[in-house]
Amino acid sequence: MAVVFDADFTSTRQWIAGRSSAYPRMGPTNRSDHKLDYLSNEYCPGGVFTAVRRRTGGLWTCNLLTTEGSPEGFQVRTGDVLATRVTLPREVGAWPAIWTWRDGGNEVDFFEYHPDNPDLLEISNHVRGGFRYWHGGGVGIGPGASFGMRVVLGANSVDWYVQDELVYADLHGVGAGWHAYLIVNLSVSDGTYHERPPFGGPERLSWVCHSLTVER
């Protein structure tokens, strides 16, 4: 296999900032998904994704980058292997994710994380079904933790590895001929299912995607 995508989170050819069809009317808000996001058109040097409390309205200015609509228009495909190294946020209310989207669906969540469930990674395949809430305290998953992940997008099974340990094989896969755009972002929880940032708490939330590559 060869690397066909190596993320540069400042590249205006690889990424579009602050606009996604996964959000109503392409954004900037998505309150129906229990998010306090107001999308920013800023890029993310060093892979640092942030959310900054806005002065009014209770929303947060949040980073979202997607390959959808970018000049290169990169899409992951059946058989691809995504590898990433991340540092999780510490602040309650932060909601980082790496996922896919196309035509109102085609979503695979490589991971989602909420610091109010400190050792839990949420991983799911919305294309053909399958999810796991994986408790990774044994390998050091927690607020501020850094670790590597690898996800194999098989036709018959999507397999998630954390620190080279197979943590979930969904045995459903994405099917032959599947493809979708990448999204990397930081949302803010509105308190419906996960704690929102406390009033009077931090004005800035962040996490880091140190690297993101796709092999084919």
Image: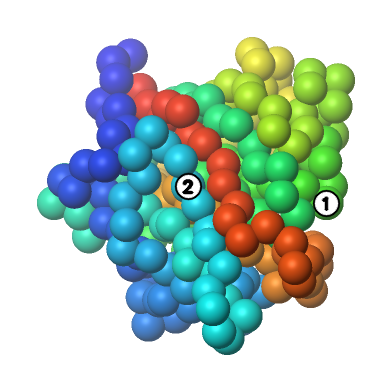
The C terminus sits in image quarter: top left
The residue located at (27%, 56%) in the rendering is 16
Residue position for label 2: 49
Residue position for label 1: 116
Type of the residue with mark 2:
Phe
Direction bottom: furthest residue:
57
The residue located at (51%, 45%) in the rendering is 98
The residue located at (38%, 65%) in the rendering is 40
| Quarter assignment of residue 196 | bottom right
Labels 2 and 1: the sequence-earlier one: 2
Direction front: furthest residue:
200
Helix or strand or loop: what does disc 2 sit on?
strand
Cα distance in 3D space between marks 2 and 1: 19 Å
Q: How is the image coloured?
A: rainbow
Residue 206 percent coordinates (x, y): 57, 47
Question: Could you classify mark 1 by the number of other residues whose Cα lies within 10 Å: few (under 14), some (14-19), or many (20 or more)?
Answer: some
Question: Could you classify mark 2 by the number of other residues whose Cα lies within 10 Å: few (under 14), some (14-19), or many (20 or more)?
Answer: many
Q: Compared with residue 206, is residue 35 higher up or lower down, i.e. above or below?
A: below
Image side of residue 194 versus residue 175, left or right = right
Helix or strand or loop: what does disc 1 sit on?
loop
Q: Compared with residue 79, is residue 64 higher up or lower down, i.e. above or below?
A: below
Residue 149 percent coordinates (x, y): 58, 25
Q: Which mark is residue 186?
A: none
Type of the residue with mark 1:
Asp
Residue 109 percent coordinates (x, y): 58, 47
Residue 100 percent coordinates (x, y): 45, 51
Front residue of 211 and 216: 211
